[in-house]
């Protein structure tokens, strides 16, 4: 007899793990199918920041920033071994795109949305402290702001959330690839391959396949409506040398895009770029021109790197899933989109986009949207109170 689950989740990235944890906490039976390994996709190739996204204030995405900052506060409590506060430095030069008053206004709003606690406040550094900033270029520098935000290990966080889900009873099959799904009136028959062709029965299918979402939808019959998306490639490079003070939020000199320079396991991580990507998500790789762009940006602000051989210890690229719209990817909304096959009693729900930071809130929103398709169950836990430990 075929196995039966309340929910089947496609994808073992942060969203798949988050939905599995929330579903199990609400008392549902849940299966996760992951084709490669946990966090094999975007969830190990992010900038690894648990943040509200200061720059999203400029585009008026206040709801997103507030939600992310609430989730940041919660993760700092629930996962102190995985998420920690960092000092962020925002240097302003004569050619920086924003003025000091704009930065002050943005940081004030950010602190307000963070709850105005003692650890949420920013300050302008006195000039005498500039020399302690990891060799930051002071030519043309006229101000440096310091504000607090948080950093994590994205893959480790994903594993911890999945572990929490499994502790509550969620099942994980890996490697296991969804091959086909058929929607019936009362649920979905899911066909997958874990070395052998298998199938299970589920009330709802949650498509958390990141950049593969529309490939997964193409395997569902009848084919549910899709959201038109662009895949936007973001590259990071890892270079030798540890940063002592924290994370630097700089503007690339060539196009004034935001780039982070971050301490990462005794070395320095620099990212990210944003380029439209066409092709198989599994084949995404850093492009030589992206590596050059990041290295030039690093050398511009941290001149000590100019004298190094261009030693790149590592580089990786991930794909953002953004609604297909005209305009540069950089200015597009980062709100998460939940898309269902039908309005009443959905059988298939697809997660488009999203932030690592807000995975828990997204997972709870998924469960709320699916309530009418699922039986009444007594919750066994609350995701707002489940501690997360490195595994
Ligand atoms: C460059 C970059 C930087 C970012 N930086 C940040 C940041 O600093 N902070 C932040 O909050 N957010 C950040 N984000 C956003 C965040 O990383 C993503 O929103 C998040 O990781 C997406 O997770 P996901 O689970 O949806 O997708 P993924 O992590 O891509 O997971 C999808 C999974 O589905 C699996 N899969 C696909 N097809 C199948 C199938 N047929 N059967 C079984 N399994 C399948 C894949 O193997 C994969 O593991 C960044 C994103 C990018 C691209």
Image (spheres, rainbow, N blue to C red):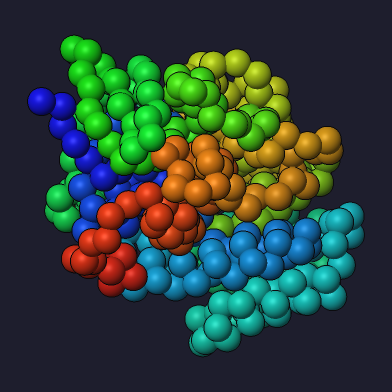
Seen in the picture, residue 306 relative to 135 is either above or below; the reply is: above
Q: Is residue 263 visible?
A: no
Q: Is residue 56 visible?
A: yes
Q: Is residue 336 left or right of residue 371?
A: right
Q: Is residue 301 left or right of residue 168?
A: right
**Outermost residue to the top:** 196
Residue plotted at (70% across, 22% down): 289
**Outermost residue to the front:** 185
Residue plotted at (83% across, 35% down): 326
Q: Nearer the viewer, residue 329 or 381?
A: 381
Residue plotted at (64% across, 67% down): 63
Residue 139 percent location from the top left of the image: 81, 56
Q: Nearer the viewer, residue 138 or 350?
A: 350
Residue plotted at (10% across, 25% down): 1
Residue 368 percent location from the top left of the image: 43, 59
Seen in the picture, residue 268 relative to 137 is either above or below; the reply is: above
Q: Nearer the viewer, residue 251 or 105?
A: 105
Residue 376 percent location from the top left of the image: 27, 61
**Outermost residue to the left:** 1
Q: Which image quadrant for residue 270?
A: top right
Residue 161 percent location from the top left of the image: 29, 52
């Amino acid at each position: 007899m075929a196995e039966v689950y309340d929910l089947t989740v496609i994808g073992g990235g942060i969203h798949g793990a988050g939905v599995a944890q929330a579903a199990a906490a609400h008392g549902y039976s849940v299966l996760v199918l992951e084709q490669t390994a946990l966090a094999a996709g975007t969830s190990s190739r992010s900038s690894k920041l648990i943040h509200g996204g200061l720059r999203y204030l400029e585009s008026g995405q206040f709801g997103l920033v507030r939600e992310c900052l609430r989730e940041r506060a919660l993760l700092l409590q629930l996962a102190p071994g995985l998420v920690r506060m960092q000092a962020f430095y925002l240097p302003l030069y004569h050619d920086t795109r924003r003025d000091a008053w704009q930065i002050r206004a943005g940081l004030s709003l950010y602190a307000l949305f963070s709850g105005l606690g003692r650890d949420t406040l920013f300050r302008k550094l006195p000039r005498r402290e500039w020399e302690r900033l990891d060799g930051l270029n002071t030519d043309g520098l006229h101000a440096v702001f310091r504000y607090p935000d948080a950093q994590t290990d994205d893959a480790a966080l994903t594993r911890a959330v999945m572990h929490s889900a499994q502790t509550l009873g969620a099942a994980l099959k890996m490697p296991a690839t969804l091959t086909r799904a058929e929607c019936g009136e009362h649920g979905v028959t899911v066909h997958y391959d874990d070395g052998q062709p298998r199938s299970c029965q589920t009330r709802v299918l949650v498509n958390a396949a990141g950049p593969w979402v529309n490939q997964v939808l193409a395997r569902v019959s009848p084919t549910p409506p899709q959201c038109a998306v662009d895949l936007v490639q973001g590259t990071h490079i890892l270079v030798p040398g540890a940063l002592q003070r924290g994370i630097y939020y700089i503007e690339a000199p060539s196009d004034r895009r935001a780039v982070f320079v971050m301490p990462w396991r005794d070395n320095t991580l620099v990212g990210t770029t944003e380029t439209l990507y066409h092709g198989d998500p599994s084949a995404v790789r850093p492009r030589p021109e992206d590596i050059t762009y990041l290295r030039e940006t690093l050398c511009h602000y941290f001149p000590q790197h100019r004298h190094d051989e261009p030693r790149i210890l590592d580089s990786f690229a991930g794909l953002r899933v953004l609604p297909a719209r005209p305009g540069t990817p950089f200015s597009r909304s980062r709100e998460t989109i939940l898309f269902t096959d039908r309005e009443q009693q959905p059988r298939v729900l697809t997660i488009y986009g999203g932030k690592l930071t807000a995975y828990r809130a997204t997972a709870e929103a998924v469960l709320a949207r699916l309530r009418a398709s699922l039986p009444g169950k007594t919750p066994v836990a609350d995701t707002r109170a489940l501690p997360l430990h490195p595994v």
